[in-house]
Image (cartoon, rainbow, N blue to C red):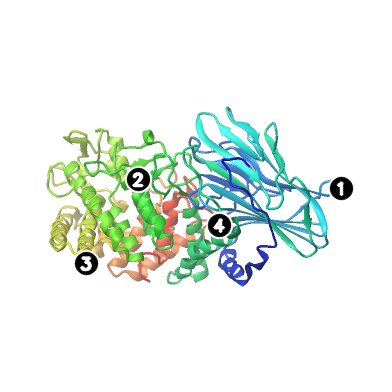
């Protein structure tokens, strides 16, 4: 046995006795079959033209072969930890069968090929023979293919597993006893593939060019009417220093089904007034699949698990701060342990001054410290608390949240008036725009940089969304302090929140226009651009009832924000409105639309909120009724999706929109 791989265990009829419990676990999972299309075969190492299946935080992924492909097995693996991710193989766990003494292979005919939450499943038939393959993850290291064979008559079969690697520069494929090992240039990572049987053993692996084959050393005996289950395992080792955990093969499949049934149990709570529950549940289930598919385990310089923005985009191979807060807020309601890990992964890199960086990667040299991101961390922590009641987590995070909150006023309040600005550590305007999260928003077109101190710069405008977020942070820090018995600190946070509320109401609201705007530093002028930041004070609870009423009228104006797919990031009647290629100059970004719906609900506009929420679900092309992925942003006039596919914060936003979370109560 190769020392880097765990053995594949062969069990005769062991899983037939799993009984009713396994069948019951399958039901909620099977109900959501083919939410997304996972069929595809890579044409190049960089091919991201189709969906890839990941689970358990694994850094390798797989797909079903493209439609019409008659061969057994799966496409892959795609190794996300190699550079920005690349395919290293085109076929994994292809099954080759031959009757003992026969002169030809047993031809398998595909019966079905499906994706269910947590697994890829394929079924084949031949004369008096049925074969089922299920690919799933035992943990973040091991991808398993569960092979189940049953025969209508007693027969002996020669069995082998075959695979094909991609001819990557510097990659090398070699046999090592009963294992196949693939190494990569300029990387300590290795892939180990193995077949082993209890009572039987795998013969020496054979490598020929980019193909490999591992066969049992003697025939497999199938008794009439009896099922035989075995496993193939592929282990991705990030480096030789980390030892993968052992696998309990006999229970791994049932554990997978139980875990996914648990995730999907939360989906049953999905509800939106006026929307059929089965539609709400389907979209919520797709959101769960998307978030878990973008889960990546701690590796290298990332010390806790988290969720990347999208595996479909090679630029998103790390954790971003405000993405992480949104992911955690949604994960809290079905995977709270992962939600906690996501938050910890960012705070692992909190600076001595309290700053949380923009993004972190498995190679810390790639981390971005030029800017932070909008402060939604306390909101995310409170969502975990609202979902779990976990006071210990509040205690763990409180001081870190306090330091981050205070950093904003230390490094991003140029005139020390208690209202902050977006900025950067290097003095560049581009990094300051990144810090807002709205990189090219129209409101920043005329902004200039001001130096606050060493490595601390601000834009020359106080942003209304930033200060609304900071106000909400102060009020939620007060809640945390109260839970933790810190009465004096609770009162201090309440006082700060009250002062910020008054300042935002008086300084950043235009009564004539009925909208909240950014404010220029050193002058009474407002940056009068109608953008999604204008309803953030309602989301945070800053606005007066009269201010909210005026904002609601503008939000519900079809010429501005009540578009086909509502709540674009720039009013539709602005001459700079660019819904397709504008990035933050007009498309719908689901986090901002979610906050818009929540803003209306907070101030009692429930009918309007429900109507806009239904549009968001039903007018996103292919999302509710088809297999469309969650997109990075959407055209507010048509509902067409643009930019990255399988986008995590869109998935998180839809999940929260459908009744998950402490901010939306149906």
* Distance of label 4 from label 3 (alpha carbons): 46 Å
Query: Which residue occupies 19% across, 58% down?
Result: 511
183 vs 144: above or below: above
- Label 1: state its secondary structure: loop
Q: Residue 633 in the image: state x and y as whole percent.
A: 43, 50
117 vs 645: above or below: below
* Distance of label 1 from label 2 (alpha carbons): 74 Å
Q: Disc number at residue 545?
A: 3
Q: Which residue is mark 1?
A: 102
Q: Which residue is mark 2?
A: 575
- Label 2: state its secondary structure: loop
Furthest-front residue in this view: 199
Mark 4 vs mark 2, foreground winner is 4
Q: Quadrant of residue 29?
A: bottom right
Tell me if 37 is positioned left or right of 463 in this view. Answer: right
Q: Nearer the viewer, residue 586 or 62?
A: 62
Q: Quadrant of residue 394?
A: bottom left
Q: Which residue is mark 4?
A: 118
Mark 1 vs mark 2, foreground winner is 1
- Label 3: state its secondary structure: helix
Q: Quadrant of residue 484?
A: bottom left
* Distance of label 4 from label 2 (alpha carbons): 46 Å
Question: Reading the chain from its start, which is encountered first: label 3 or label 1?
Answer: 1
């Amino acid at each position: 046995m190769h020392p880097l791989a765990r053995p594949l265990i062969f069990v005769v009829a062991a899983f037939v006795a799993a009984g009713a419990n396994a069948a019951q676990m399958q039901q909620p999972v099977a109900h959501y079959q083919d939410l997304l299309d996972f069929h595809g075969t890579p044409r190049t190492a960089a091919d991201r033209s189709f969906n890839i299946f990941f689970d358990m935080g694994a850094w390798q992924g797989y797909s079903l072969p493209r439609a019409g492909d008659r061969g057994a097995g799966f496409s892959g693996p795609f190794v996300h930890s190699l550079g920005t991710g690349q395919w290293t193989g085109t076929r994994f766990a292809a099954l080759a069968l031959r009757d003992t003494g026969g002169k030809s292979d047993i031809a398998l005919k595909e019966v079905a090929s499906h994706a269910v939450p947590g697994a890829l499943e394929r079924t084949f038939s031949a004369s008096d023979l049925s074969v089922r393959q299920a690919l799933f993850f035992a943990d973040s290291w091991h991808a398993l293919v569960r092979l189940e064979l049953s025969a209508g008559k007693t027969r002996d079969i020669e069995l082998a597993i075959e695979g094909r690697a991609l001819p990557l520069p510097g990659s090398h494929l070699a046999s090592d006893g009963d294992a196949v090992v693939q190494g990569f240039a300029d990387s300590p990572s290795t892939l180990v593939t193995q077949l082993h049987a209890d009572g039987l053993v795998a013969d020496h692996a054979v490598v020929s060019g980019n193909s490999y084959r591992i066969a049992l050393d003697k025939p497999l005996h199938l008794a009439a009417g009896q099922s035989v289950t075995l496993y193939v395992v592929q282990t991705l080792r990030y480096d030789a220093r980390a030892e993968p955990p052992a696998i309990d093969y006999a229970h791994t499949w049932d554990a997978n089904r139980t875990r996914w049934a648990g995730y999907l149990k939360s989906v049953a709570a999905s509800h939106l007034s006026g929307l059929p529950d089965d539609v709400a549940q389907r979209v919520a289930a797709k959101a769960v699949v998307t978030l878990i598919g973008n889960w990546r385990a701690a590796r290298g310089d990332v010390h806790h698990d988290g969720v990347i923005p999208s595996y479909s985009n090679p630029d998103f191979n790390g954790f971003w701060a405000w993405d992480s807060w949104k992911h955690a807020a949604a994960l809290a309601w079905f995977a709270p342990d992962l939600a906690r890990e996501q938050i910890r992964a960012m705070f692992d890199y909190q600076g001595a001054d309290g700053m949380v960086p923009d993004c972190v990667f498995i190679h810390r040299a790639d981390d971005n410290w030029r800017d932070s991101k909008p402060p939604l961390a306390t909101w995310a922590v409170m969502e975990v608390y609202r979902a779990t009641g976990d006071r210990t987590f509040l205690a763990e995070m409180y001081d870190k949240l306090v330091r981050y909150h205070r950093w904003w006023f230390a490094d991003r309040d140029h005139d020390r008036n208690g209202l902050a600005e977006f900025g950067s550590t290097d003095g560049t305007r581009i990094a300051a725009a990144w810090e807002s999260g709205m990189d090219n928003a129209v409101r920043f077109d005329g902004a200039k940089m001001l130096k606050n101190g060493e490595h601390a710069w601000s834009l020359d405008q106080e942003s209304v969304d930033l200060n609304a977020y900071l106000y909400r942070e102060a009020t939620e820090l007060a809640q945390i302090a109260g839970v933790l018995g810190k009465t004096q600190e609770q009162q201090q946070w309440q006082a700060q929140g009250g002062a910020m509320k008054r300042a935002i109401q008086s300084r950043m609201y235009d009564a004539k226009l009925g909208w909240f705007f950014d404010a220029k530093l050193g002058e009474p002028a407002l940056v009068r651009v109608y953008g999604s930041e204008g309803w953030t004070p309602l989301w945070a609870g800053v606005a007066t009832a009269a201010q909210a009423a005026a904002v609601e009228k503008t939000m519900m104006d079809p010429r501005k924000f009540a578009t086909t797919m509502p709540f674009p990031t720039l009013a539709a009647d602005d001459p700079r409105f660019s819904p397709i290629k504008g990035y933050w100059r007009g498309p719908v970004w689901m986090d901002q639309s979610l906050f818009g719906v929540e803003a209306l609900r907070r101030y009692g506009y429930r009918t309007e909120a429900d109507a806009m929420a239904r549009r968001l679900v039903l007018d996103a092309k292919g999302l509710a009724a088809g297999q469309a992925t969650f997109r990075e942003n959407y055209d507010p006039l048509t509902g067409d999706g643009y930019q990255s596919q399988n986008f995590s914060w869109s998935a998180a936003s839809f999940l929260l929109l459908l009744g998950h979370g402490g901010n939306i109560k149906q």
